[in-house]
Image (cartoon, grey):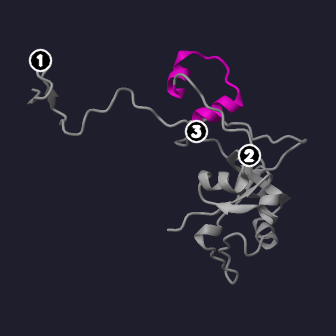
Amino acid sequence: MTAILYPVATDARLALSQPRGRAAREREALEIAGDIVAFVTEPVGPDYATREAALDAHAGRIEDDRPGRLVSLPSEDRILRLVQQVAPRGGRLRAPAPVAPTFTEGHRWPAHQGDPAATIWRVMISYWRIGAAPTLKVGGPQARYARKRGREPVDSDTLQAYTRQPLQPVKPQQPLDIGLFERRLPEAPHIVVPDE
Protein backbone atom coordinates (compact mmCIF):
# COMPACT_ATOMS: atom_id res chain seq x y z
CA MET A 1 0.00 0.00 0.00
CA THR A 2 1.31 3.44 -0.90
CA ALA A 3 1.61 6.02 1.86
CA ILE A 4 -0.48 9.18 1.74
CA LEU A 5 1.57 12.15 0.49
CA TYR A 6 0.43 15.05 2.67
CA PRO A 7 0.97 18.63 1.47
CA VAL A 8 3.59 20.83 3.15
CA ALA A 9 2.28 24.40 3.59
CA THR A 10 1.87 27.26 6.07
CA ASP A 11 -1.93 27.05 6.28
CA ALA A 12 -4.87 24.88 5.16
CA ARG A 13 -5.81 27.08 2.20
CA LEU A 14 -2.31 26.90 0.73
CA ALA A 15 -2.11 23.17 1.46
CA LEU A 16 -5.15 22.71 -0.75
CA SER A 17 -4.13 25.05 -3.59
CA GLN A 18 -0.34 25.65 -3.60
CA PRO A 19 1.67 23.35 -1.33
CA ARG A 20 5.47 23.59 -1.32
CA GLY A 21 5.66 19.88 -1.81
CA ARG A 22 4.23 16.62 -0.52
CA ALA A 23 5.65 14.27 2.06
CA ALA A 24 4.58 11.06 3.74
CA ARG A 25 6.89 11.37 6.75
CA GLU A 26 8.04 14.15 9.03
CA ARG A 27 11.66 13.77 7.91
CA GLU A 28 10.68 14.42 4.29
CA ALA A 29 8.45 17.37 5.30
CA LEU A 30 11.37 18.92 7.24
CA GLU A 31 13.56 18.73 4.13
CA ILE A 32 10.90 20.40 1.98
CA ALA A 33 10.02 23.11 4.51
CA GLY A 34 13.47 23.89 5.87
CA ASP A 35 11.75 24.69 9.17
CA ILE A 36 9.91 22.86 11.93
CA VAL A 37 6.68 21.18 10.90
CA ALA A 38 3.69 19.72 12.71
CA PHE A 39 1.11 17.32 11.35
CA VAL A 40 -2.35 18.91 11.65
CA THR A 41 -5.89 18.31 10.45
CA GLU A 42 -7.94 21.48 9.94
CA PRO A 43 -11.17 22.53 8.25
CA VAL A 44 -10.81 24.17 4.86
CA GLY A 45 -13.39 26.12 2.89
CA PRO A 46 -16.93 27.06 3.86
CA ASP A 47 -19.54 25.05 5.73
CA TYR A 48 -21.94 23.01 3.59
CA ALA A 49 -25.57 22.31 4.42
CA THR A 50 -25.56 18.84 2.82
CA ARG A 51 -23.05 16.12 2.08
CA GLU A 52 -23.91 16.32 -1.61
CA ALA A 53 -23.06 20.04 -1.74
CA ALA A 54 -19.65 19.37 -0.17
CA LEU A 55 -18.93 16.51 -2.58
CA ASP A 56 -19.97 18.63 -5.57
CA ALA A 57 -17.76 21.55 -4.44
CA HIS A 58 -14.71 19.28 -4.16
CA ALA A 59 -15.46 16.88 -7.01
CA GLY A 60 -12.50 14.69 -7.87
CA ARG A 61 -10.62 15.54 -4.65
CA ILE A 62 -12.72 13.51 -2.17
CA GLU A 63 -13.84 9.91 -2.49
CA ASP A 64 -17.43 9.89 -3.74
CA ASP A 65 -19.67 6.84 -3.35
CA ARG A 66 -22.84 8.25 -4.93
CA PRO A 67 -24.29 6.21 -7.79
CA GLY A 68 -23.22 7.61 -11.16
CA ARG A 69 -20.52 9.80 -9.59
CA LEU A 70 -18.17 7.20 -8.15
CA VAL A 71 -14.68 8.57 -7.52
CA SER A 72 -11.93 6.42 -6.05
CA LEU A 73 -8.69 8.27 -5.45
CA PRO A 74 -5.23 6.73 -5.38
CA SER A 75 -4.12 6.14 -1.80
CA GLU A 76 -1.42 8.85 -1.92
CA ASP A 77 -4.04 11.55 -2.72
CA ARG A 78 -6.43 10.89 0.19
CA ILE A 79 -5.71 14.10 2.11
CA LEU A 80 -9.30 15.38 2.30
CA ARG A 81 -12.23 13.92 4.19
CA LEU A 82 -15.77 14.99 5.01
CA VAL A 83 -16.99 15.32 8.58
CA GLN A 84 -20.43 16.09 9.90
CA GLN A 85 -20.53 18.49 12.85
CA VAL A 86 -23.22 19.99 15.02
CA ALA A 87 -24.03 23.45 13.65
CA PRO A 88 -23.02 26.35 15.88
CA ARG A 89 -25.88 28.11 17.67
CA GLY A 90 -25.49 31.70 18.76
CA GLY A 91 -21.90 31.89 17.49
CA ARG A 92 -20.74 28.93 19.61
CA LEU A 93 -20.56 25.24 18.90
CA ARG A 94 -22.72 23.47 21.48
CA ALA A 95 -23.48 19.79 21.68
CA PRO A 96 -26.98 18.73 22.66
CA ALA A 97 -27.59 18.38 26.39
CA PRO A 98 -27.11 14.84 27.72
CA VAL A 99 -30.22 12.80 28.41
CA ALA A 100 -30.59 10.83 31.63
CA PRO A 101 -31.60 7.15 31.28
CA THR A 102 -35.10 6.29 32.49
CA PHE A 103 -35.20 2.47 32.78
CA THR A 104 -38.99 2.40 32.33
CA GLU A 105 -41.11 -0.14 30.48
CA GLY A 106 -38.10 -2.20 29.50
CA HIS A 107 -36.39 0.72 27.77
CA ARG A 108 -33.28 2.40 28.98
CA TRP A 109 -33.58 5.70 27.12
CA PRO A 110 -36.58 8.04 26.97
CA ALA A 111 -38.47 8.61 23.74
CA HIS A 112 -36.91 11.15 21.42
CA GLN A 113 -38.21 14.64 22.04
CA GLY A 114 -37.77 17.54 19.68
CA ASP A 115 -35.86 17.86 16.46
CA PRO A 116 -32.34 16.52 16.09
CA ALA A 117 -29.54 19.07 16.28
CA ALA A 118 -28.81 20.86 13.01
CA THR A 119 -25.59 19.71 11.37
CA ILE A 120 -23.14 21.04 8.82
CA TRP A 121 -20.57 19.31 6.62
CA ARG A 122 -16.93 20.39 6.69
CA VAL A 123 -14.02 19.40 4.50
CA MET A 124 -10.98 18.54 6.63
CA ILE A 125 -7.45 18.53 5.22
CA SER A 126 -4.48 16.79 6.82
CA TYR A 127 -1.12 18.39 6.08
CA TRP A 128 2.33 19.30 7.40
CA ARG A 129 2.10 22.86 8.75
CA ILE A 130 5.34 24.83 8.41
CA GLY A 131 6.54 26.79 11.42
CA ALA A 132 3.87 25.31 13.69
CA ALA A 133 4.52 24.99 17.37
CA PRO A 134 5.61 21.47 18.18
CA THR A 135 3.07 19.25 19.89
CA LEU A 136 3.01 19.63 23.65
CA LYS A 137 5.10 16.98 25.36
CA VAL A 138 3.70 15.85 28.66
CA GLY A 139 6.36 14.94 31.17
CA GLY A 140 5.89 12.97 34.31
CA PRO A 141 3.19 10.37 34.85
CA GLN A 142 0.87 9.03 32.24
CA ALA A 143 -2.75 10.08 31.97
CA ARG A 144 -4.00 7.09 33.97
CA TYR A 145 -1.83 8.11 36.93
CA ALA A 146 -2.48 11.84 36.60
CA ARG A 147 -6.22 11.14 36.63
CA LYS A 148 -5.96 9.03 39.79
CA ARG A 149 -3.57 11.44 41.47
CA GLY A 150 -5.98 14.32 41.80
CA ARG A 151 -9.03 16.03 40.46
CA GLU A 152 -7.22 19.18 39.41
CA PRO A 153 -8.56 20.79 36.25
CA VAL A 154 -6.51 20.14 33.11
CA ASP A 155 -6.36 22.60 30.22
CA SER A 156 -7.31 21.40 26.75
CA ASP A 157 -3.73 21.41 25.36
CA THR A 158 -2.48 19.14 28.14
CA LEU A 159 -5.49 16.86 27.77
CA GLN A 160 -4.85 16.55 24.02
CA ALA A 161 -1.19 15.79 24.70
CA TYR A 162 -2.24 13.06 27.14
CA THR A 163 -4.39 11.42 24.45
CA ARG A 164 -1.47 11.39 22.00
CA GLN A 165 0.98 10.00 24.56
CA PRO A 166 1.86 6.34 23.99
CA LEU A 167 1.03 3.92 26.77
CA GLN A 168 3.97 2.81 28.89
CA PRO A 169 4.11 -0.60 30.56
CA VAL A 170 3.46 -0.76 34.28
CA LYS A 171 6.61 -2.85 34.77
CA PRO A 172 9.32 -3.96 32.34
CA GLN A 173 8.34 -6.83 30.09
CA GLN A 174 9.90 -10.17 30.93
CA PRO A 175 12.51 -11.42 28.47
CA LEU A 176 11.00 -13.53 25.73
CA ASP A 177 13.06 -16.61 26.59
CA ILE A 178 11.30 -16.93 29.96
CA GLY A 179 7.86 -18.49 30.00
CA LEU A 180 4.90 -17.49 32.11
CA PHE A 181 5.64 -20.11 34.78
CA GLU A 182 9.43 -19.83 34.78
CA ARG A 183 11.86 -17.66 36.74
CA ARG A 184 15.58 -17.05 37.11
CA LEU A 185 17.32 -18.26 40.23
CA PRO A 186 18.53 -15.33 42.36
CA GLU A 187 21.88 -17.02 43.07
CA ALA A 188 22.34 -18.05 39.39
CA PRO A 189 20.54 -15.62 37.02
CA HIS A 190 21.72 -17.56 33.97
CA ILE A 191 19.57 -20.56 35.03
CA VAL A 192 15.82 -20.63 34.29
CA VAL A 193 13.70 -22.96 36.44
CA PRO A 194 9.99 -23.81 36.43
CA ASP A 195 7.97 -21.84 38.95
CA GLU A 196 5.20 -23.87 40.61
Q: Residue 38 location in percent, x, y?
A: 68, 46
Q: Nearer the viewer, mark 2 or mark 3?
A: 3
Q: Position of residue 78 (x, y in %)?
A: 64, 66
Front disc: 1 or 2: 1
Residue 147 on image: x %, y % = 55, 22
Residue underneath mark 2:
113
| Residue receiving disc 1 | 187
Determine whether 110 is above or below 170 in the image. below
What main secondary structure does the magenta stretch of the protein show?
Answer: helix
Residue 27 in view (yes/no): yes
Please say if 148 is above or below 29.
Answer: above
Q: Is residue 30 magenta?
A: no
For the residues bearing labels 1 and 3, Cβ distance under 8 angstroms: no
Q: CA distance from mark 2 to mark 3?
A: 37 Å
> Residue at the location (11% across, 27% down)?
195
Q: Is residue 146 part of the magenta span, yes or no?
A: yes
Question: Looking at the picture, which amino acid does disc 1 mark?
Answer: Glu
Q: Residue at x 67, y 20 (%)?
A: 153
Q: Left or right: 171 with respect to 80? A: left
List x then y, in percent, for residue 17: 81, 65
Kind of residue at badge 2: Gln
Query: Which comes sooner in the sequence, label 1 or label 3?
Result: 3
Q: Which residue is mark 3?
A: 164
CA–CA distance in space, label 1 to label 3: 42 Å
Amino acid type at image mark 3: Arg
SS type, badge 3: helix
**Span of residues in magenta:** 142-164
